[in-house]
Image (cartoon, helix red, strand yellow):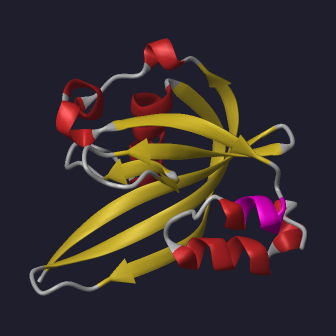
Amino acid sequence: MKVRHNVRAVLLDDDQLVFLHRRWPGCLAYHTTVGGGVEPYDPGLEAALRREVMEELGATIGPATEFLTLTEPGEKVTVVRHYFRAELLDLDLDRRGGPELDDPDTGDFAPVRVAPDASAVTALALQPPELVDYLCRHAKTWGVER
């Protein structure tokens, strides 16, 4: 069985959480975390996370702390998603780069900021649902209040 690792970021910017609004051709728009696959040349999970944040947002982050790991078994590939919490230090969409921006079939994505409370996070229809559950259950740690 092959295992593929993904890194994802829940970003904090002052008093807001930052996610991605994604639109794919022919599909409904949705919200998700910044991130993507760990490449063979990445020296580790946090390095992959920093690369993905720069590619998708043109942003840099402070220290990253892993807080949740989700495993999705498949017939041929098991995907392990590593979720990190990090503070956004700066963001400049003009610095974005990477394969997603060059391929029109990957759709478009833009940052969205929301208040750190359960109703705002739930209203996003954020994916995956396990992440929303985690954020709501750990409200005091994240500033997400019910």
Q: Quadrant of the N terminus?
A: bottom left
Q: Tally the numbered discs.
A: 0
* Residue drawn at 50 percent across, 30 percent down: 57
* Residue drawn at 79 percent across, 44 percent down: 16
Spot occupied by residue 116 in the image (x, y as percentages of width and height): 82, 55
Spot occupied by residue 44 in the image (x, y as percentages of width and height): 38, 52
* Residue drawn at 9 percent across, 81 percent down: 76
- Work out whether 79 lies above or below 33: below
Q: Which residue is the extreme one toward the top? A: 94
Span shown in magenta:
117-121
Would you identify the image quadrant in which residue 12 lies?
top right
- Work out whether 30 lies above or below 145: above
Spot occupied by residue 92 in the image (x, y as percentages of width and height): 56, 17
Q: Is residue 96 left or right of residue 12?
A: left
Task: Give whichever of 123, 49 is nearer the camera.
Answer: 123
Does the magenta segment cover residue 118?
yes
* Residue drawn at 43 percent across, 33 percent down: 56
Does the magenta segment cover residue 97?
no
- Work out whether 30 lies above or below 43: below
Q: Is residue 13 left or right of residue 67?
A: right
Spot occupied by residue 91 in the image (x, y as percentages of width and height): 61, 23
Task: Give whichever of 104, 43 is nearer the camera.
Answer: 104
Q: Main secondary structure of the magenta part?
A: helix
Q: Is residue 64 left or right of residue 108?
A: right
Q: Quadrant of the C terminus?
A: bottom right
